[in-house]
Amino acid sequence: MPYNIVVLGAGGVGKSVITIQYLQNKFVDEYYPTIADTYRKTLQIDNKTCTLQIMDCAGTEQFNSLRNSSIKDADAFLLVYSITCAHTFFTTTEIYEQIRLHGKAEIPMVVVGNKIDLEEQREVSMTEQEEVFPEDELLKTYEITAKNKEDVDNVFVSIVRMIKSMQGEYDSSENENEKHEKGIFEVLSSCWSHHCTTN
Ligand SMILES: Nc1nc2c(ncn2[C@@H]2O[C@H](COP(=O)(O)OP(=O)(O)O)[C@@H](O)[C@H]2O)c(=O)[nH]1
Ligand SMILES: [Mg+2]
């Protein structure tokens, strides 16, 4: 069974570029905002072979896929914001809270502040990230640039380690998932208008 990782966040923060960097080892300058796709990759992590199924969500596809089964089947969420766009940080906060509040309370999440190569345009401090997202066994945080392959790899390794340590320990019942899906849907609908334009 692959590990299902769902990538969420406001538009323009780098979700697709991070996904492509991880899978294809390249930084793409332009990636169409409407493209949403699911990718698979088999790799060695901690000397074990595993398959990741990564769902890169976009725009309305983000909502449609949430209505479908991808969220129900998620083993972990990767929440991305851009350090250059404060509103995308708040979007991440809202998505995070909805996931924790509406079912799947026990699911691993990684919160990533992307675009640290654009330090001069920074709007979200590392302190803010630490305060809003204190790390624990179900939550890890990073600041990265999608231009750096190593940064991106570390994020996915961290996700897989958390999924592994959680395996068999959480029960995602149908009812909880329904609640959860609805909550997330509402949040994302209201947040999608936020779009980061720095790159
Ligand atoms: N400078 C810089 N630009 C980035 C970075 N990550 C993504 N971008 C750019 O930001 C834009 C939006 O990225 P994309 O992955 O399409 O955003 P998405 O809507 O979240 O999928 C693209 O032009 C990317 O090249 C980064 O780490 N640094
Ligand atoms: Mg995208």
Image: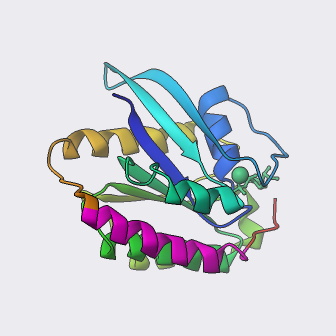
User: Is residue 31 at least partly visible in the picture?
Assistant: yes
Rendering coords of residue 186 (x, y %):
53, 77
The image quadrant where one finds the C terminus is bottom right
Rendering coords of residue 17 (x, y %):
70, 45
Rendering coords of residue 25 (x, y %):
67, 28
Q: Determine the residue positioned at 21% across, 46% down.
A: 166
Rendering coords of residue 62 (x, y %):
61, 58
181 with respect to 122 (left or right): left
User: Is residue 104 at least partly visible in the picture?
Assistant: no
Quadrant assignment, res 167: top left
Residue most toward the right?
Answer: 30
Q: Please provide the residue range marked out in magenta.
A: 175-194
Q: Does 85 sit above or below residue 140?
A: below
Q: How is the image coloured?
A: rainbow
65 with respect to 37 (left or right): left
Which residue is nearer to you in this view: 159 or 189?
189
Q: Determine the residue positioned at 27% across, 58% down.
A: 174
Quadrant assignment, res 9: bottom right
Q: Determine the residue positioned at 46% across, 40% down.
A: 156
Asked if the magenta segment contains residue 172, the reply would be no
Q: Does 88 sit above or below residue 35?
A: below
Identify the main secondary structure in magenta. helix
Which residue is nearer to you in this view: 17 or 124?
17
